[in-house]
Image: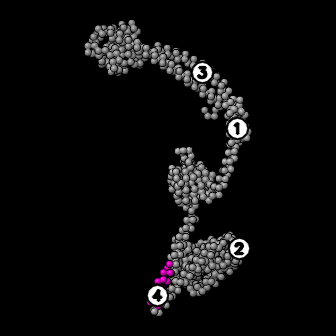
Amino acid sequence: MKNQKLITRLFTSYVLIAVVAIILIIYFSSRAIEKFYFAQKAAELKARAELVQEIIGGYTIGETDSLHNLCESLGKRTDTRITLINSLGIVIADSKENPGNMDTHSDRPEVIEALERGEGLSRRHSYTLEEDHLYYARLMTEDGKNLIIRVSFPTVALEEALGALKVDLLLIGLIVILIIAGLNFYISRIITKPIEIMETGAKRFAKGKLKMKVPESSVLELGSLAKSLNEMAAQIFDRIRTITQQKNEQIAILSSMTEGVLALDKDGRILSANRAAADMFGYKPKRILNRFLYEMIRHAELNDFVAQVLNSNDTLQCRISVYEPEELILNVIGSRMPAKKGTIAGAVIVFTDLTRIQKLEGVRRDFVANVSHELKTPITSIQGYVETLQNGALTDTKNAERFLEIIAKHAARLGRIIDDLLELSRIEEFSGEDEKVLESTKIEDLFRSTIDNCQELSAERNIQIKTEIDPDLVLKVNTKLMVHALVNLLDNALKYSPQESVIILRAYQKKSSIILEVADEGVGIETEHLERIFERFYRVDRGRSRDIGGTGLGLSIVKHIARINKADLEVESTIGKGSIFRLTFRV
């Protein structure tokens, strides 16, 4: 029925209904006539069986020859087959066949029913005469013994008469069908012609020509339909304009959002996704549309969360971590979209990237913990020695002087920590985006200022500082801050290098980059510490760092200065051979 014209559907439907109706009439009429005829014949057989019962009432069951002759005589006169059967199913007399040649009849339906209920009726095929018969069996008792009287006649004549009747009915039905088909075609054509005109107008509407009108028919119902179509087209035009405007606004809002938004149907298929959501999971927005969420984002926790959202009326929230295309910590909020009562339209899932916030929170916690720890140690020592002096140690001149030296040492350490914290705070607030603070400076001058600041410690530890540099290399940097960074790196190298070793300040150009290196021959740094040495207060060897006066903020200051000067900071180190701190500037 797909892609058929209305006239074809109407014509086919009505003709099919007529054919089915006539076939049913013929079928039930034939069945009714057949049932009526067989009911009449069954009553007739019952009467004949009663007559046979009265006639053979004067005979005994043992007079088989007499009974057989009697059955033959009665059968010829009544054109009926008469059979006498004992309770064991053995035929003792028959009007058509020799009883000695006949099989036992204990399995015949009419015989079984007569033995159980007193009489039985069946219509079946006779294996003795090889033709269909209608049988009636009646139970009689003679001398305390059961005898079954069975009468029957062939159904061939009836079937021939019914066949002729069915042919006549089919011819009549065919004539009626042809008449109905002609009338149906004429009526269908009258109905469909104005509808075809409206169809043409509807096609114009489908092409977007909503301002054109459908001509109204003179038929009242079709005229009303044409008027409704024209009104509908005007309303659709207004709604499309409104929806288009709303859609453009929604697209603009979703595209500008930093949160990822996914709209899912009730089966978890992605209906829409903004760019932020697609970027979070490494896809283009169009690629993930109409795909199942579990197919595009293989994350068991997220898929379980979506299943919970689709089965809950509440707004749910969870936090997940994803590792592809990059490691992210996402806060996920999901809410089901209701449709009609008792149904689910889908769900909206919103992803908020908490990665940077989480990292900053971790840095803040570590900073607070580290500051507390770094300040607590010298303060505790100062408090302890002060209390000792207050409790009488002031009179012990020798120990009092030693205690005061220790207090002075810890106070100086507190001062250095506070100075470094203030310096770090100033550097973090420094605007690296301001190009005015960056100026062209010869690297040779940077190295000279750096060495001058560390000359005293170098001489004290008998460590030689060498430079490897192209004198013409120039960098655009904040000179003061860059010298500060290089001094911190060189100071660390001097403190952690053995005496009489060599430290090299190196500068060279590699493709489109200028690289500054501070290389020492110190103890080196284990690989597990390399990723964290630029964190504030992080120390590889805390005890040794305090002994040599380090605050744990020097490398963190270097990292921030590198960021302001648009440089990448990295480190290479081998235990027992030394370390290389490298600043890479893109030029």
Left or right, 540 with reference to 91 = right
Q: How far apart are the alpha carbons under marks 4 and 1?
A: 103 Å
Q: Which mark is residue 436?
A: 2
Which quadrant, please, contains the C terminus?
bottom right
Q: Main secondary structure of the magenta part?
A: helix
| Contact (Cβ within 8 Å) of mark 1 with mark 3 | no
From the viewer's perspective, is the residue at label 2 or at label 1 nearer? Answer: 1
Say which residue label 4 marks. 390
Q: Which mark is residue 230?
A: 1
Is residue 379 within the magenta segment?
yes
From the viewer's perspective, is the residue at label 3 or at label 4 nearer? Answer: 4
For marks 3 and 4, the one nearer the N-term is 3
| Contact (Cβ within 8 Å) of mark 2 with mark 1 | no
| Mark 3: amino acid | Ile
For numbered disc 2, what is the local secondary structure? Answer: helix
For marks 1 and 3, the one nearer the N-term is 3
Across and down, in percent, residue 278 comes to 60, 56
Q: How far apart are the alpha carbons under marks 1 and 3?
A: 40 Å
| Mark 1: amino acid | Asn
Which quadrant, please, contains the N terminus?
top right
The part of the image, by quadrant, that contains residue 297 is bottom right
For marks 4 and 2, the one nearer the N-term is 4
Across and down, in percent, residue 356 comes to 58, 65
Q: Residue furthest left?
A: 143
The boundaries of the magenta stretch are 376-394
Q: Nearer the viewer, residue 282 or 31?
A: 31
Say which residue label 3 marks. 177
Residue positioned 38% across, 11% down in the render: 47
| Contact (Cβ within 8 Å) of mark 3 with mark 2 | no
Left or right, 79 with reference to 2 = left
